[in-house]
Image (tube, rainbow, N blue to C red):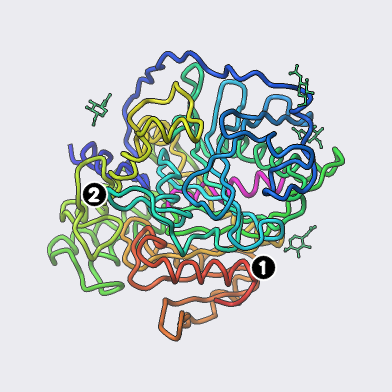
Amino acid sequence: MVLSDLSGLLACLCFISATVAQIVFENSAQQSLRTNHVNKTEMFAWAGDGPNGLFTPLESLSLLKEDQFTTMRHPSFPKYSVRIKKSDFCDPTVNAYTGYIDIEARHLFFYFFESRNDPAKDDVIFWTNGGPGCSSSLGLFFELGPCRVLDESGAKIHPESWNTNANIFFVDQPIGVGFSYADYGESVGTTEEAAKDIAAFVAIFFENFSHFKGRAFHMAGESYGGRYVPLFASAVYDQNAGMIEAGLTPINLTSVMIGNGLTDRYSMFTAYYEMTCTSASLSPVLDIGTCVTMKQTLSRCEKWSRESCIDQYDYINCGAAAAFCTNAIAVPYRLTGLNPYDISIPCGGGPSDLCYPETRYIRQFLDDPSLRSKIGVDSSVPTNFSSCNSEVNLAFGLTQDILHETPTYVSALLERGVRVLIYVGDLDWICNWIGNEKWTLGLEWTGQAEFASTPLREWTVDGKKAGKTRSAGKFTFATIQDAGHMVPYNKPKESLQMVQRWLAGEEL
Ligand SMILES: *[C@@H]1O[C@H](CO)[C@@H](O)[C@H](O)[C@H]1NC(C)=O
Ligand SMILES: *[C@@H]1O[C@H](CO)[C@@H](O)[C@H](O)[C@H]1NC(C)=O
Ligand SMILES: *[C@@H]1O[C@H](CO)[C@@H](O)[C@H](O)[C@H]1NC(C)=O
Ligand SMILES: *[C@@H]1O[C@H](CO)[C@@H](O)[C@H](O)[C@H]1NC(C)=O
């Protein structure tokens, strides 16, 4: 009973439950989809540098309309197209665009904001939130977007937005999440499947908006993004060979950034003990009896996981091991009522609030029919916005997606020259800094010895300590002091400084 309670409560910036009995997907009947008539002459008219922003074709500023979508296709990706429109909202100082990536019957919603600095030169960032099953609107409106919705007064400009000097995407993925939808109830339950759609989207986008060709591209995410982003970036990287062969410009994948990620599930179990029973971040939060029991089950959890998940993967055994570990090591913290995303505060709000009552204002904002119509949300999307989709979460649970290998993708990216930033707010419990430090130190790659022997040092913002960091070669680990799971929410200034230094290729 605790577990079902748990998975509900955790819904679900970071997925924890590994025992899922059986799920029946209800295919909500979908109708009335795309009715937009596409004018083929206009469709292929993209080119040139309009004065009005990167997406504006030379000939006619009106081609990208606010009141209807324009569709882009690419012959190399016959099953894919992108519907995009101008959407004047959130940040009046830049051009904003929204739309859908259409993959036959699957439709992924995205927001795109140009840089506040120099859109024609600045890097491009891709952002996804985690879950699995949670909408990137949380990242946009709660954390790092050009506007934030933190109270009933609605959207307010966010001065420390990550589009300060970068162009940025927020994608609701996979299908079923946020404003994304599927025509016939299709679903995605693995990161590998999700990665194919993302890689194709990235290729179409860069190919058709030729201003961006060759532009430095960074893929970023949070929480379950710790699994998504390494696989998404690998798919984009591997796709480049095919793009070159087809005579296209490869994507200039420059870095990945992962915030409070769940990249290695296994090191997180051990880390839960340290977070709650030692002074690793704050003083111990669990009582001595509970800590002793946890410590005793820890070695069993580690041994069982190693044997049935890591050395040799066995679906049933691995799932059982993960359930055992969750029960023994994660549940005691849940029972404290503390916030899983910040050990310094209680979990606030109702069951849909993700422990932050403020998230309800984002849902209200995204429920508004006039906003939906402005940004082009399809009419088949449910009228009540859900920050996280529990069916998607369960689908990933069924495939044990998180129990599959992820850190090796990070090594593979590093070996190919892609820079990797792992940053962690040090008050987060669920995807905490201890587990993240552990896997980064243990990661096998050419620079491992140098990385592992580099001590943590302080990094500062305006002369004040912002956290700790270590780097070797293209790999950087950093903590953000006094921040929880959603670092840019707690520490907007420090997180922007961090990103700016990272994009500029500077030390933190
Ligand atoms: C399509 O758009 C072009 C350019 O705006 C226009 O000249 C042409 O008449 C349009 N065709 C149709 C069928 O609407
Ligand atoms: C997308 O790019 C391809 C290849 O450059 C081109 O053939 C196609 O017309 C472009 N489509 C649009 C809508 O720009
Ligand atoms: C990729 O981006 C980096 C950083 O802006 C730049 O130095 C490099 O020349 C770009 N590479 C290509 C092939 O365009
Ligand atoms: C949607 O939200 C409204 C207002 O909060 C509520 O009355 C209604 O029951 C909700 N509908 C569904 C299907 O949850």
Category of crowding for the residue at label 2, using alpha-carbon neighbours closer than 10 angstroms: few (below 14), some (14–19), many (at least 20): some
Residue type, label 2: Pro
Picture residue at 74% right of the left edge, 28% below the top: 43
> Which residue occupies the foreground of this view, 335 or 465?
465
Q: Which residue is mark 1?
A: 446
Residue 206 location, x and y as percent? Answer: 72, 44
Q: Amino acid at mark 1?
A: Thr
Residue 1 falls left or right of residue 118: left
Quarter that holds the C terminus: bottom right
Residue 458, quarter of the rendered image: bottom left
Q: Residue 319 falls in which quadrant of the image?
A: top left
Q: State whether residue 483 appears in this view.
A: yes
The region drawn magenta spans: 223-238
Of the image marks 2 and 1, the number of the one nearer the N terminus: 2
Secondary structure mostly seen in the magenta stretch: helix
Q: Nearer the viewer, residue 489 or 304?
A: 489
Question: Do labels 2 and 1 touch, CB within 8 Å?
Answer: no
Q: Name the element at disc 1.
A: loop
Disc number lying in front (2 or 1): 2
> Dot 2 corresponds to which residue?
357
206 in relation to 226, above or below: above
- Element carrying mark 2: loop
